[in-house]
Image (cartoon, rainbow, N blue to C red):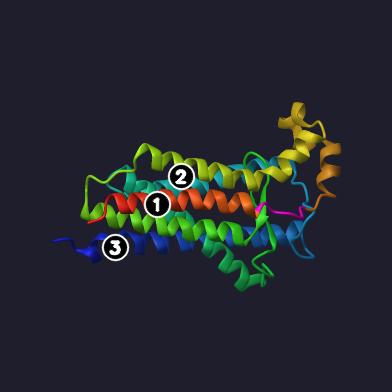
Amino acid sequence: MINTKEAFKPFLWLCIFAAAMGFLEAAVVIYMRRIFYPAGFGFPLQMFDPSLLFIEWLREVATIIMLVSAAVIAGKNFLQKFSFFLYSFAVWDISYYAFLKLALNWPASFFTWDLLFLIPISWVGPVLAPIINSLTMILMAVCFVYVQKYNKSAKLELRELALIIFGGIIILYTYLIDYSLLIAKNGFLPDFFSLATNQNFIALVSGYIPETYNWELFIIGEALILYATWRFYRRNDF
């Protein structure tokens, strides 16, 4: 007989771990905003010193490595490890925004624009978008682990995996398109690896404020991922 409590025990510890990481992430961002945005964070962005930017890239990579490591330890097979990574990432992200709201009363609304990541270029979008992504990740993780507890042979089919990847790429596109176009349309592609020291690019970024987010594409990406998750669940109905 399946012990449901024992089966979902990893979620509790991963939640605690990821929430603590979310607090650490928020603390770092609070310090950075006090230094770079003393009047409060907003667009246009302030360019980092190249050495600090490199350290920030490494910090982001280290964060992902920690989340992956926790998932690998908690999971017993690929699908569980993948599920626990999605869950940890989602709790980390939601906790991050929750702690920022408590400490800085930011964001002002779910539609406030945020700088999400910096690798390889700036990811930007309204706060609501990554929160929706995170809730979707939690749903996926619980669904996958729940199904596999009753059917240990359950695996994602190639079609389902392809839908998840394609949906993720579409969503990623909505986050990257603003600064990608800024780089491409203004002829900065040949200098991509030296953008942090390119004065013309710095001047351009210092005056750029994103205004429109492609919610239509975002919804399509989310729909593909949710369909793949639903298909997996129905295919393994018990």
Q: Is residue 213 magenta?
A: yes
Residue ID for mark 2: 164
Task: Residue under label 3, please give it.
Answer: 9
Q: Which residue is mark 1?
A: 229
Tell me if residue 205 can be seen: yes
> How far across and down, in percent of the image, does residue 205 sit?
80, 46
Q: Nearer the viewer, residue 67 or 56?
A: 67
Q: Using the image as rendered, state which of residue 231 and residue 39 is in the foreground.
A: 231
Tell me the kind of residue under disc 1. Thr
The amino acid type of the residue labelled 2 equals Ile
Q: Earlier in the sequence, mark 3 or mark 2?
A: 3
Extreme residue in the left direction: 1
Relative height, residue 207 to residue 188 (above, below): below
Please state which amino acid type lies under the numbered disc 3.
Answer: Lys
Q: Is there CB contact under 8 Å for labels 1 and 2?
A: yes
Q: Residue at x 69, y 53 (%)?
A: 213
Mark in the foreground, 3 or 1: 1
Q: Are marks 3 and 2 in contact (CB under 8 Å)?
A: no
